Image: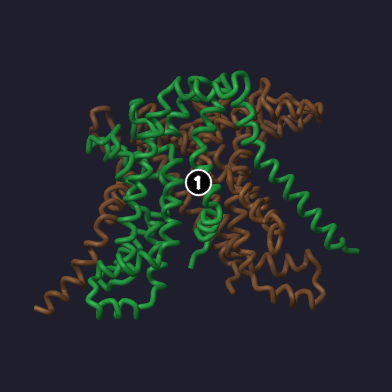
Amino acid sequence: MRASPAARRIGKHAILLAGAVVMMLPFVWMIATSLEKGGLRNYVEAWSQVPFGTYFLNTLVVTLLTVAGVVVSSALAAYAFATMEFRGRGMLFLLFLSTMMVPQPVYLVPSYIILARLHWIDTFAALIIPWTTNVFSIFLLRQHFRSIPRSLYEAAVLDGCSTFGYLWRVVLPLSRSALVTVILFDVISSWNSFMWPLVVTNSESMRVLQVGLSYFNQEASSNFPLLMAASTFCTLPLLVLFVLSQKQIVSSYARSGLKD
Amino acid sequence: MRSRVKRWTRSVAPLLYILPALAVVAVFRIVPILSSFAVSFTRYDIGGLHRISGLENYARMLGDPRFWSSALNTVYFVLGVVPAGIVIPLALAMLLRGKLAGKSFYRTIYFLPVVTSAVAVSVVWTWLFNPEGGPINSVLMLFGAGPLMWLREPRGVFDMLLSPLGVHPSGMLAGPSLALVALMIVSVWKSIGYNTVLFLAGLENIPGEYYEAARMDGAGGWSSFRHVTWPLLSPTTYYVLVMSTITSFQTFALVYVMTAPPGGGPLGTTNLLVFYLYQKAFDRFDIGYASAISVFLFAILLGLTVLQRRFAGRKVVYE
């Protein structure tokens, strides 16, 4: 005996909707609690109790500069790996890829020592520079660059295009969707990063949003309306970004799982 | 002249393109990775002096009960999170596959926790799990259950479940504390969307003809899942397995925000390896010892990847 297609469809939606409710409830509770006892005043109070303005600004600076660095350095490296012949290319690429296998906590401690030697602890340099390249981005862009037909390059060279000009005027414009993927990935991971900024900064004026929120959580640990208000405005920018570009983000993440 | 130009484009130009990325990778990945091995064989003093101490840090590790308990907690955590993070997303993806009204709506909602920061997620769930007046206990009490202490409960869940029956498992048999199980719930909730999207992409790569053929052979829903979907999906399943093992081993923010400070949750039962490493390095400045833990962590992750490749990888079917 088989259920009719209509009954199956209703059953599917019942399960999926129940799942969606479970996934959404924490967000609903976050917003509902943030408006308890005082309504929107909770937001003003949370914002002014600790310098969230500074944290936002720091996070924005770090995210923008990190992503700019990633895009520039990854595009250049990926271009060389994809289109140029040189000795040691395979080895070098393998070396890059192998660093991707090592999780961050493994090299956190020695990185801290290096930053301390450079006197970078508690500076923007420590927050930004170590993350201005991303091997995964290089990998993704290289795959894309390689799919561009070689004949385009020969045609461009005949027209007097330089190697860099070809990257700038032909390859990059053809790789818009791959670049958007790289940018979205890095915006999200940079905005949300926590362990690194927690370790490499100490002063309040250098705090980023995630670190600031975790300290606020310790200070105001029983005032849940204020904490929920702070959580709401800390997640809001990315939630907006996600809603605006959800198709692109979801397909980017889906692509991250396809290895070839 | 020409050959010099050629040599320039052959060898120097490519390096110039790679240089910015290479500099960062070398200074902030390769050097730290290699030196974490070196530092693990030293004793690091406040003055920054390293004294070679041989295997001392590793010997300390073997005799450190807190290291072992955090290793055990990590094993519990991974064993809880990884299977749930495969079964639930796979079921959701099976429901979402094909043409379905509202598909992108569901996908968006399931995906929301993935892009939300772990810190904010942890702050919110701390409130949800709050023993006094938190929403989860309120719901439980509607059904006549609870209240539970959740993040403050050090008792093992098997002990809690079985003690009404008069059975009192202790030690490792008591299982992970309820507090650690609460962290597992959050971790699974946060990763469901990502894994679902991966499975969905995998499912949609399976050509329809296979199902057609299975139907011709009289295969029903379960047997076509068993004989078509499961084997052809195996590269995705394998990837999800490896990735979620690696990421759940690295859990830090949940522990830090939800159950610490002062650290490690109720009786240390939510202290996971990466959090322990962090405490040793940055609360105690026991840098050498922390490096030994990180080398251990690396060895475990590498070993697991190799093992999974040998066992699961052998069953992976590529078209």
Residue B156 picture location, percent across and down: 66, 31
Label 1, on which residue?
A241
Q: Coloured how?
A: by chain
Colour of the chain lettered B: brown
Q: Quadrant of the N terminus of chain B?
A: bottom left
Residue B12: in sight, yes or no?
A: yes
**Residue at position x 49%, y 31% in the image:** B256
Q: In the picture shown, does residue B89 fall above or below B176?
A: below
Q: Nearer the viewer, residue B135 or B249?
A: B135
Residue A168 picture location, percent across and down: 30, 65
Q: Quadrant of the C terminus of chain B?
A: bottom right
Colour of the chain lettered A: green
> Residue furthest toward the right?
A1
Quadrant in the rendering for residue B150: top right
Residue A89 picture location, percent across and down: 29, 68
Q: Relative to residue B247, is residue B104 drawn left or right?
A: right
**Residue at position x 62%, y 49% in the image:** B85
Indicate the amino acid at tag 1: Leu
Residue B68: in sight, yes or no?
A: no
- Specify the subunit that label 1 lies on: A
Is disc 1 surrounded by few (<14), some (14 to 19) or many (20+) residues within 10 Å? some
Label 1: state its secondary structure. helix
Q: Nearer the viewer, residue A257 or A111?
A: A257
Q: In the picture shown, does residue B303 fall above or below A207?
A: below
**Residue at position x 51%, y 28% in the image:** A230
Q: Nearer the viewer, residue B222 or B306?
A: B222
Residue A10 picture location, percent across and down: 81, 54
Quadrant in the rendering for residue A203: top left
Count of numbered labels shown in the rendering: 1
